[in-house]
Amino acid sequence: MSIKVVDNKDSLITDLAKLIETTAKESICERGFFNVGVSGGSLAPFLVSGLPKIQTDFSKWRVFFCDERIVSYDNTDSTYGLYLQKLIVPEVVALKQEQFIPIKLGLTPEETAQAYEEELRKYVPLNNSLPQFDLLLLGMGPDGHTCSLFPGHDLLQETRKWVAPIKDSPKPPPERVTLTLPVVNNARVCAFAVAGIEKSDIIKKILLDKEDLPATRVQPSSGKLYWIVEKDAASKLNM
Ligand SMILES: O=C1O[C@H](COP(=O)(O)O)[C@@H](O)[C@H](O)[C@H]1O
């Protein structure tokens, strides 16, 4: 695991962008495509600012969602809706809408998860019978959740599903789908980007005390794990 503490949000964005650029380059050179999973929440503005800075062949990218809230795309809670508005705009980045794989709407949470799993089956190569993403870009909430995997929730025990529904998310909105831990931990690279003093306690619990929280359980089995942490968020790490 690599932990890098950076001075401010701008440096975090620069470092994250560099990591994405390198990982995309390797994936495209080795396999001809780049399958990346993005998160919502505070990570989204980092990507909106960082992706336009990177040198890559965007036509080789396919963009998935590490988790998504089951709401219409024009709802302010929709992560896809947010990227649609702020990132998938020709003046911002050369990524086209059809390169994004959003959840299907109008289904039950179970059907939504099932349908997303079918999309993974179509596009993401398997390794050890599980889809293997080239890169998962992860956020972490102040309670230690990542994707829509919340502390103490039954979904942390899921071993069969690739994408799971959740109907009782403690953070609204309640209905969501999420990649499960076996899929997250099968990725070639997982990267967290975390900023803000309000995350300093939980960063300590995860990176120093190694408390058993969802974000602590992100331990790619054969891949790499990066944490890029802004200095206020890292202030209780004594680094
Ligand atoms: O609800 C969610 O929360 C996490 C963390 O969000 P943050 O705003 O505290 O960074 C996010 O990674 C996830 O995609 C989102 O659905």
Image (tube, rainbow, N blue to C red):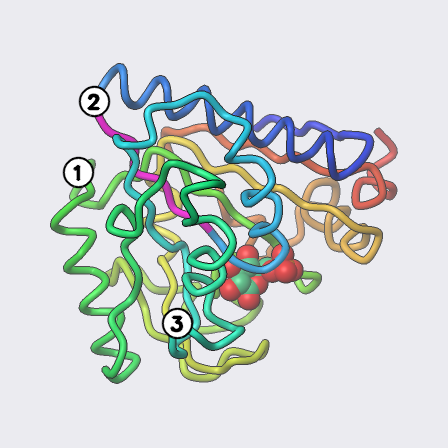
Q: Amino acid under label 2? A: Arg
Residue beneath the point at 69% across and 27% down: 4
The residue labelled by disc 1 is 125
Q: What stretch is highlighted in magenta?
A: 32-38
Crowding near the residue tagged with mark 2, few <14, some 14–19, many ≥20 C-alpha atoms within 10 Å: few
Q: What element carries label 2?
A: helix
Q: Nearer the viewer's eye, disc 2 or disc 1?
A: 2
Residue beneath the point at 47% across and 63% down: 79
The residue labelled by disc 2 is 31
**Can you give x and y, in whole percent of width and height, for residue 27 in the image?**
30, 23
Q: Amino acid under label 3? A: Tyr
The C terminus - image quarter: top right
Q: Earlier in the sequence, mark 2 or mark 1?
A: 2
**Can you give x and y, in whole percent of width and height, for residue 109 in the image?**
30, 80
The N terminus - image quarter: top right
**Can you give x and y, in whole percent of width and height, for residue 46 in the image?**
61, 44
In this orientation, which residue lies closer to the viewer: 152 or 35?
35
Relative to residue 198, is residue 59 drawn left or right?
left
Relative to 235, say whether 32 is above or below. above
The residue labelled by disc 3 is 73
Relative to 216, say whether 175 is above or below. below
Q: Which of marks 1 and 3 is nearer the N terminus?
A: 3
Relative to residue 115, is residue 137 drawn left or right?
right
Relative to residue 78, is residue 62 drawn left or right?
left
Q: Is the magenta stretch mostly helix, strand or loop?
A: strand
